[in-house]
Image (cartoon, rainbow, N blue to C red):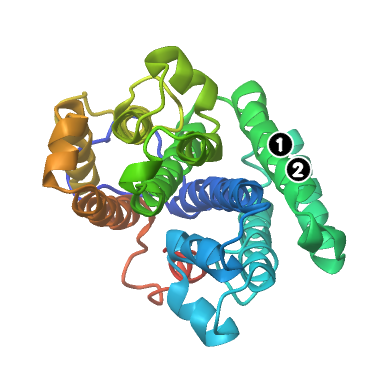
Amino acid sequence: MEWQADTQSAQSGPKMLSRVAESVYWMSRYIERAENVARFIDVNYNLTLGDGSPLGSQWHPLVYTTGDEELFNELYGEPTREGVLEFLAYDDRNPNSILSCLTRARENARSVRDTIPAPMWEHINTFFKMVKSAAEGGQSRVEPNAFCDAVKQSSHTLVGLTYATMSYGEAWHFTRLGRLMERADKTSRIVDVQYFLLLPNAQEVGSALDVVRWSALLKSASALTMYRRVHGQITPANVAGFLILDREFPRAMHFCLIFAQESLCQITGTSLGTFNLRSEQLMGRLRTDLDYTSIDDIVRSGMHEYIDQFQNQLNQLGEAIHQDFFRLPTSITEGEQSQTQSQSIS
């Protein structure tokens, strides 16, 4: 069965199976999601070392960042460092924990082993076993840095294998599309939460503590060095602007949308600036908004309001991608193919 567009775009050339496209797309999203959760944990842990504030007040925002606050409250109640770490890293009841993400990434990869190169499958399998082993041990709960570094490194290795061993066809572009959609979402979430939390009291502006906090936000996106090259001095507006609007930094929201749109156009065969599918239309609108927005415009309209709107539009885009490429004919039981994927969309 081939994926079919709702209109007559993308009629040139053979199209891959919708289930294969969905599996590689979600495989990539889950890996990227796991890496981002590890980034949040790692930077927050370092930021809170020696902090005299109540531990829960520093760790609870991470749960909000991942969009799982309601589930955490149901399972754990009051936030503590230990509870938040367990929930975000190892709790298989949390569909967005690192362990859950790797479990689902491995399931998707297994279903398309004939599509992805053998080194990719072998690495995902090894990656899953590493996380599973850490979940069964105890040391990473006390000192999570080494575990988080291993997750990030394993994710980066998989991206490298994708670029080095996979043909740049439709499956490759679905893989990149999934990774960049997930990355844009998680960058927007960390900017939204941390921008609010880190806005300092007047007496702290420009202090050593102020710089450390904003540096930590940049480190959560591995952005500190590249930010320094562009802006030098750390200021809240410049940090937010870099992570939202920079066209060249690979974890910036704008960068993600530029190259996600490129992959979408490669998949459909539609020229940039035109559309035949709903997903192409929404992608173009969202990318164009970032093309012509300044950080002053964003701050003036409200950082939270802007990012909340961005996330809503990104969710609509994700649903349109599902409808355009992954939806099965009505003759097949609804939800049979996409059930495990949609349950974990935050």
**Residue at point 57%, 25% (across, down):** 167
Q: CA distance from mark 1 to mark 2?
A: 5 Å
For the C terminus, the quadrant is bottom left
Secondary structure state at the residue bearing disc 2: helix
Q: Viewed as shown, does residue 280 lie left or right of 232?
A: left
- Mark 1 is surrounded, within 10 Å at the Cα level, by few (under 14), some (14 to 19) or many (20 or more) other residues, namely some
**Residue at point 54%, 51% (across, down):** 33
Residue 192, position as x, y percentages in the image: 34, 51
Identify which amino acid the numbered label 2 is placed on.
Answer: Ala
**Residue at point 67%, 62% (across, down):** 89
Residue 54, position as x, y percentages in the image: 57, 68
Residue 73, position as x, y percentages in the image: 50, 82
Does residue 141 sit above or below 10 in this rendering? below
In contact (CB < 8 Å): disc 1 and disc 2:
yes
Quadrant in which residue 237 is drawn: top left
- Mark 2 is surrounded, within 10 Å at the Cα level, by few (under 14), some (14 to 19) or many (20 or more) other residues, namely some
Q: Which mark is residue 150?
A: 2
Mark 1 = which residue?
153
Identify which amino acid the numbered label 1 is placed on.
Answer: Gln
Does residue 252 sit above or below 329 in this rendering? above
For the N terminus, the quadrant is bottom left
